[in-house]
Image (tube, helix red, strand yellow):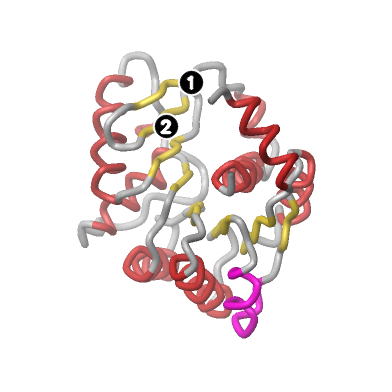
Amino acid sequence: MEAYEYLEKIRAAAPRVHCITNYVTAHDVANMILACGANPVMADEPQEMGEITAHAGALALNMGTPSERREQAMLAAGKAANANGIPVLLDPVGVGASAFRRKMAEELLEAVTFTAIRGNMSEIRKLSELAEKNVTGSSGGVDVCPVDVVTEETLVEAVTFVKAVSKRLGAVLAVTGAIDLVSDGQQCVVIRGGREEMSRVTGTGCQLSGLAAAFLAV
């Protein structure tokens, strides 16, 4: 099917997309999901995660503003989604920025089966290290490290890496940046046309994760 056909399916089905996202971009993410025809639910109270998630078409977990309470909500929602056959997307925002985020990501990877993971190359590289129990210190904040910027010169190496990590984690990887890479472990789609200006607006990655979750729902 073509992308526009899936968009038509979203608008026809109007699936509910449950997002546990960061408070910086929650409003923008909700509006992005609404704009594509789906229905956002931005609940993050741990006590209601089982009920809320069970009625969703997809679940998006965003680590942008982590807390112990939000971690418990993500774990409960992720387990409920897995139990009900609901696709789950992880956005490991700034996963290398602190020991707390790294521990949170490790626990999510151990407890939840993810359908898709979206992040920049630095975040995906750190997530891969955590999955291998090979943590090697901090990789900075939420922005991609210069060494991890995908260019035409490093493209072949980046594609090989992304395919390997996708296969290891058992999830579709969407690695965004100047050049985007999307892989299911077997194939890798290369998407060119990134704009530097996008890095000057907060939340574009979070919005993409919400949008991707809406597509996973159909």
Q: Quadrant of the C terminus?
A: top right
Q: Position of residue 205 (x, y in %)?
A: 59, 42
Q: Position of residue 161 (x, y in %)?
A: 26, 34
Q: Position of residue 127 (x, y in %)?
A: 34, 53
Residue 217 in the figure: left or right of residue 95: right
Give the residue number, with chain letter if any, for mark 1.
191
129 falls in the magenta region:
no
At a point 42% along the width and 32% down the height, the residue shown is 182
The answer to whether the residue labelled 2 contacts the one labelled 1, judged by CB atoms less than 8 Å apart, is yes
Residue flagged by tag 2: what amino acid is it?
Val
Give the residue number, with chain letter if any, for mark 2.
182
Mark 2 → mark 1, Cα distance in angstroms: 8 Å
Tally of numbered tags? 2
At a point 32% along the width and 45% down the height, the residue shown is 125
| Predominant SS of the magenta segment | helix
Residue range highlighted in magenta = 44-54
In the depicted structure, whether residue 155 falls above or below residue 211: above
Residue 69 in the figure: left or right of residue 121: right
Residue 126 in the figure: left or right of residue 91: left
Q: Earlier in the sequence, mark 2 or mark 1?
A: 2
At a point 60% along the width and 81% down the height, the residue shown is 46
At a point 31% along the width and 27% down the height, the residue shown is 187
